[in-house]
Image: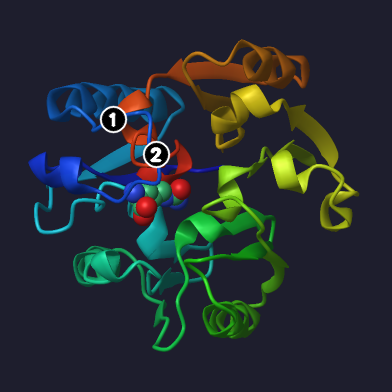
């Protein structure tokens, strides 16, 4: 059960955010603001108290708050993003989290890790080794998790940006899987909700207190998650998709 979320309003500099997309074009700032508000509304509808941080123009990708911290029930961990242009985002989030949590830990150089590469399954955390998250970052975070009676394990990514680009845990042993994660033995004990490649963007969705928030426009994903017994809430995040950002990366939930 989550009670709170932290989000950051996109700044005008969002148009300069990192992107691997060659076809989707640049995000539209005004549209991004509208979509961000709808996202906040969806979290609120699921019962969360949403704390909205001011835009941070200096960091174009700073609306993707999930990447700069991991909040667990026992501690909050400030990450060290693998993308050099995002490294400075951590200072403000550290300030924000210090006001809320007692146990704050940090990842140090040369470790790199981004929250999009961390998937919580109860008190175990799967960590994707990616272009953004290195072995040293994973080693440090697993050590911290152990210190607080939790555990972690790694999985190497082949194609996707982040682990949760292709995986989402929906509690009750239900796992959304797509692309390179289908048939992966690491996840064989979970009930797998398989997502077709043409709807892969919606593999990044979030469980919030018995509801699942998914991006708007993915009918197969919507149906399969509804069939698994969840209330589905759709929200349009197409402006964030243009920067390779999914639903999960727009908030820290705890
Ligand atoms: C980036 O490349 O860092 C941002 N444009 C998108 C980050 C997406 N974050 C996530 O999936 N957790």
| Depicted 253 relative to depicted 39: above or below | below
Q: Position of residue 7 (x, y in %)?
A: 29, 44
In front here: 119 or 201?
A: 201
| CB of mark 1 near ligand 1 (< 8 Å) | no
| Depicted 61 relative to depicted 89: above or below | above
Q: Give residue 125's quadrant in the image.
A: bottom right
Q: Are marks 1 and 2 in contact (CB under 8 Å)?
A: yes
User: Residue at 75% across / 47% down in the picture?
Assistant: 181
User: Residue at 15% across / 30% down in the picture?
Assistant: 29
Image check: 78 left or right of 2?
Answer: left
Q: Position of residue 185 (x, y in %)?
A: 89, 55
- Distance from disc 1 to disc 2, alpha carbons, whole Å, reads 7 Å
Q: Which residue is mark 1?
A: 25
User: Residue at 63% across / 43% down in the picture?
Assistant: 166
Q: Secondary structure at mark 2?
A: loop
Q: Position of residue 227 (x, y in %)?
A: 77, 15
Image check: 82 left or right of 160?
Answer: left
Q: Quadrant of the N terminus?
A: top right
Q: Give residue 238's quadrant in the image.
A: top left
| Depicted 229 relative to depicted 251: above or below | above
In front here: 112 or 44?
A: 112
Task: Determine crowd level at label 2: few under 14, some 14-19, many 20+ residues with C-alpha closer than 10 A.
Answer: few
Q: Secondary structure at mark 1?
A: loop
């Amino acid at each position: 059960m989550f009670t709170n979320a932290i989000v950051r309003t996109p700044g005008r500099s969002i148009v300069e955010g990192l992107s691997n997309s060659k076809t989707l074009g640049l995000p539209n700032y005004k549209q991004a603001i509208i979509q961000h508000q709808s996202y906040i509304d969806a979290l609120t509808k699921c019962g969360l108290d949403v704390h909205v941080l001011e835009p941070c123009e200096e960091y174009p990708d700073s609306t993707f708050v999930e990447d700069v911290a991991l909040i667990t029930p026992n501690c909050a961990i400030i990450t060290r993003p693998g993308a050099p242009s995002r490294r400075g985002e951590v200072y403000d989030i550290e300030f924000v989290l210090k006001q809320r949590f007692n146990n704050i830990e940090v990842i140090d150089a040369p470790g790199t890790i981004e929250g999009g590469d961390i998937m919580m399954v109860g008190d175990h955390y799967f960590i994707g080794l990616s272009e953004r998250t290195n072995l040293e970052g994973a080693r440090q975070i697993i050590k911290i998790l152990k210190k607080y009676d939790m555990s972690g394990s790694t999985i190497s990514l082949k194609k996707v940006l982040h682990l949760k680009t292709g995986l989402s845990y929906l509690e009750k042993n239900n796992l959304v899987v797509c692309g390179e994660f289908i048939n992966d033995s690491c996840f064989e004990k979970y009930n797998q909700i398989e997502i077709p490649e043409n709807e892969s963007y919606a593999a990044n969705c979030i469980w919030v207190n018995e509801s699942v928030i998914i991006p708007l426009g993915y009918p197969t994903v919507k149906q399969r998650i509804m069939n698994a017994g969840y209330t589905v809430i759709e929200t349009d995040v197409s402006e964030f998709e243009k920067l390779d950002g999914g639903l999960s990366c727009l908030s820290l939930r705890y």
